[in-house]
Amino acid sequence: MEGINNKGRVKVLDSATDDGAEADYTLDGQVVSITYTTGRNDKGTTYSAKINYQLKVTRISDNEIIANKTFEATSSTLFSTFYTKLDAVNSAVDFIDAQIPDFVDEVFKSYGTVIEVAEVKKDAAKKVYISLGSEDGILKGQKLDVRVEKTIGGRTINKVIGEIKVESVEGADISLCKVTKEGKEIQKAMLETPDAVTVVTKVNTNIFGL
């Protein structure tokens, strides 16, 4: 709950303390299993822990399950050695904190538009302003896909044309972003069909796959 609330995009209400509060979704979580691996060194028995847990999000209006995902969190023994099961479990819980922001990005996406191009170099957009900010849970470093709405065969699609990364959150509904992919495509779209250029948050995958 703390990890989701810290993301700032959605607020989790505790059913035990927020009775009567209106909500749009229900969040069910359960620990599927906790397993331990033991070892030994010159100081005694060592432990590592693995937690398998599940998160399910259901939309209240139509009772549709919009996310049902199982995660695995393992205690980090790269820099630490754990001599009790509790210490090993606490380390695994810290790993859960790193997984939750991506879960929020995947399930509770924020949608906005490109307001204007802030910097151009050699016909390529280098920086842009978007219509998402602190009220949308946008943080520095957040990545977003840039899309263009097109109609093909009577169907409306949103084609991804580039990627941006939040450089600074300027207000409740505005952020300055650095263009990280396809600056020329973004600049072209903003010149030709600016009203059709939109953005959507994406998962910030790092080198560890988190």
Image (cartoon, helix red, strand yellow):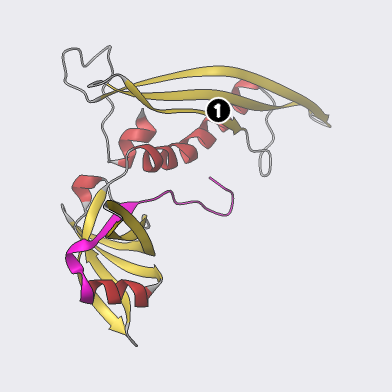
Q: Does residue 62 show up?
A: yes
- Locate residue 144: give its quadrant: bottom left
Foreground residue among 123 and 143: 123
Foreground residue among 117 and 36: 117
Foreground residue among 62 and 166: 62
Is the residue 91 above or below the residue 185 in the image?
above
| Quadrant in which the N terminus appears | top left
What residue did someone put label 1 on?
Answer: 90
| 14 sits to left or right of 205 | left
Which amino acid type is marked by label 1? Asn
Q: Residue at image x 64%, y 27%?
A: 50
Q: Residue at image x 66%, y 44%?
A: 79
Please state the horizontal and vertical placement of residue 154, each as a whole percent of the image: 26, 52
Give the magenta part as a residue range: 191-210
- Locate residue 119: give its quadrant: bottom left
Given the current orientation, which residue lies at the most extreme bottom position? 122
Q: Is residue 79 covered in magenta? A: no
Please state the horizontal and vertical placement of residue 136, each as a whole percent of the image: 23, 46
Is the residue 150 above or below the residue 11 in the image?
below
Task: Determine whether the residue tagged by mark 1 lies in a helix, strand or loop.
Answer: helix
| 136 sits to left or right of 125 | left
Please state the horizontal and vertical placement of residue 31, each as a whole percent of the image: 52, 18
Please state the horizontal and vertical placement of residue 197, each as a whole percent of the image: 24, 63
